Amino acid sequence: MILNRRQILLLLPAAAVAWDFVLAGTPEEAPNYKMTDHWWGMLLDITKCIGCGSCVRACAMENDVPDGYFRTWVERYHVEDWHIENPIVDSPNGGKDGFPPSGETGGKNFFVPKLCNHCTDSPCTQVCPVGATYHTPDGVVLVDYNYCLGCRYCIQACPYGCRFFHPDRHTAEKCTLCYHRITKGLTTACCEACPTGARQLADLKNPEDPIHAFLKTHSVQVLKPHLATGAKMFYNGLDGSVR
Amino acid sequence: MSKFEDSAHLTSLAVAFLLGIVAFVALRAAVIPKSFGRYGPYRGDALKEATARPLAYAGHEACEGCHPDVLEIKSKGAHARVNCESCHGPLAKHADDPGSVIPVKPDVAKLCVRCHSENIAKPSNFPQVDAKEHAQGQPCNTCHQPHSPGFDAGGKK
Amino acid sequence: MEGFMYPNEVELQWSVLIVLYPFLTGLVAGAFILASLERVFRVEAVKPTYRLALLTALAFLIVAPLPLQLHLGHPERSLEMYLTPHRASAMAMFGFVYLWYLMAVLILEIWLDYRRDIVLLAQSSTGLKRQLYRLMTLGSYNISPGALRVDDRVGWIITLIGIPSAFLLHGYVGFIFGSIKANPWWSTPLMPVVFLFSAMVSGIALVLLMYMITSVIRRTTIDMNCLDAIAKYLFYTFVIDFTLEMLDLIHRIYESDESFRSLDFMVHTRLFLSQIVLQIFLGTLAPLVLLALTQFVGFSAQGRKRIYALAATLTMIGIFAMRWNVVIGGQLFSKSFLGYTTYKMAFVTKEGLLPAIFLLILPFVILYVLIKLLPPWHAGNAATVQTDGID
């Protein structure tokens, strides 16, 4: 590609900005990140999710998630008329390859993306015997892979099924809210890959974050509110049939 | 035998227990990781380890830095909010060193149908078609420009 | 898999080894409580089994952590539970309850009760055994009546502390399950109580069987007063245990909450053999009927012995089935209440059936060694052999 001078002049400042993000490709600490300035959550918009599975694939690639296990997944619901207590649900390979046609012709049908809710009062961190799973000061629940015993008590305690036992590392494992990305000013891999904006990272401590306006003007829910886990993944348009 | 002598064996027992406790306390001081408890009841160094993962996805701002022409086209069409790597896959390595890693053009036949094939569970206002009927054997980019696919936005090839 | 399960739920996390663990600790608690009946509540009739019950408890307590070690993803890190225990975690606190019970209750009580014999054996034996006994004396050879009185007093206090400690030991295991709000099969305040009473039932049944078996091996006559007393306590404890489990069941059926339909289906299909057949009919109702018969109908000593042996064996099977139904049953259904999975138990893997069988046999091997080392029937101790004339 031959560039003329004008094109070079346009490209140089762009390249300078890009260089910062090039550096983001290398593992490093996040020097300008202050944990106490942030409180992470996410907005999941059921009215926008198309079940393409891009989020599941992106997460797997960003975080080396082993096959057959899921840090995030998508469920498809079919609700017949008023039978909200008996939905038909499926999640073929976690929705990783999208969803084949279900053959349903009526009823109410929709997709629900799920992931770790990074609960404020998480039952999983409560039961860990050694402090290998914990809350960061900025509201993310993480697993310390070098400390976890692999007792799997946390996996039993999670009401949402978002934890699993890593087959190679033999420790507990789950969504990290792409902590290595959000501490560098990037968004999570699943939000980056979502083509419809159904998933959006939210910084609840940032007064300018669009989630605050959204929460004021929409009906939002969390999963299993009766368990009072303090979940921070907020769902817009979540149907009563969702488990 | 005096009362004290009769309980002497208990004294040696108590000493054994005490030694055990002292040994335990010493072990704790030696073996517990130094960063434990820095931010809470966990190993503080774990936070550093969590942030030190390499990136797979560069993030759309990295792409737009070098490819403003594509951004220009995309921002006018229906795919304005679709991030680059959503279709092109993780490209942090390419953003790191553009020359060494050449991204492979996505396979149109598989890529477009993943989002746009008809499915009753998709929101009704989302553009979806029965791929076979609609395309009639032609690849999607015969008629649609992937970066700005809508006909109205001038995306028609 | 049947129906829908969250994708990460299909594989079970806790295997048959985790079924074994509450079974073993339950036997410890039960055997110890039977022993304390004699020491603290002065139930003279069960005296012949006092030392045997303590040694049985010790043998099983030693083996109890082994299934856990096999199960852990990183057993080399298990010391972390003692170094940085997370105080909110029931599992972490249990590590200390176990340690307390082992060191401050069981071993201490055994040592105090056996001290006279240990000193005598240290003086009379030879070779390696002599060195071992000398070590166990902790340097003191004082077995004067005054010293033995001190031992008796302190032992009494330790047994007194030991009873709530034994309750804590196994009640805590029940709490480890009962405090998980995510799992409605486990989450009930009754869980620690049910675990404790079923532990007592299994422990008493075990001591009854051990007493009968060791008497047969040693060709000594069984003290029928003792056996009848043990069977009586087994019966009473079983009635309480059964009442508690029925209360839980009736409550679930009546309230019929969100999880009930799913759990009900699971019990009738996946858990039919282990819950309905093994735990309820063969493992609870049958022994209860058998024991009730002996309480209200007059049988000969021979008849009673046979019924007790059968009832105790069925009880052990039933309590093991109960642990299976709690641990495995709690993982067979989805937390979405829309589906089920199956437990594929392997045979020769780290967490398979073979290690489980081995770990079930190991306590008896250890008990054999303990009996050889610290004979419960050494002349001069409380366990005298009596006959009641009828055999």
Image: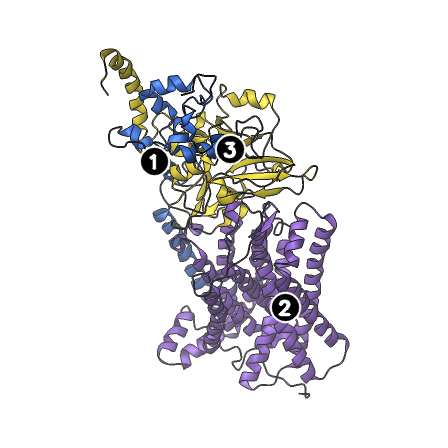
Chain colours: A yellow, B blue, C purple
The answer to whether C175 appears left or right of C360 in the picture is right
CA distance for labels 3 and 2: 82 Å
Q: Nearer the viewer, residue C147 or C361?
A: C361
* Chain label for disc 2: C
Q: Dot 1: what SS?
A: loop
Q: Amino acid at mark 3?
A: Glu
Q: Marks 3 and 2: which is nearer the front? A: 3
Q: Position of residue C41 (x, y in %)?
A: 65, 67
Residue that badge 3 annotates: B133
The answer to whether A165 is drawn above or below residue B61 in the figure is below
Q: Marks 2 and 1: which is nearer the front? A: 1
* Chain label for disc 1: B
Let me know if marks 3 and 2 both belong to one chain.
Answer: no
Let me know if marks 2 and 1 both belong to one chain.
Answer: no
For the C terminus of chain C, the image quarter is bottom right
Q: Which mark is residue B52?
A: 1
For marks 3 and 1, the one nearer the N-term is 1
Rendered residue at 69%/80% (across/down): C304
Let me know if marks 3 and 1 both belong to one chain.
Answer: yes
Q: Dot 2: what SS?
A: helix
Q: Nearer the viewer, residue C256 or B10?
A: C256
Q: Dot 3: what SS?
A: helix
The answer to whether B112 is drawn above or below residue C21 in the figure is above
**Local crowd at mark 1 within 10 Å, few (<14), some, or many (≥20)?**
some
Residue that badge 2 annotates: C37
Instruction: Give yes or no for contact between labels 3 and 2 (Cβ–Cβ under 8 Å).
Output: no
Q: Position of residue C45 (x, y in %)?
A: 66, 76
CA distance for labels 2 and 1: 59 Å
Q: Nearer the viewer, residue C39 or A237?
A: A237
Rendered image quadrant of residue C201 = bottom right
**Local crowd at mark 3 within 10 Å, few (<14), some, or many (≥20)?**
few
Rendered residue at 51%/35% (across/down): A51
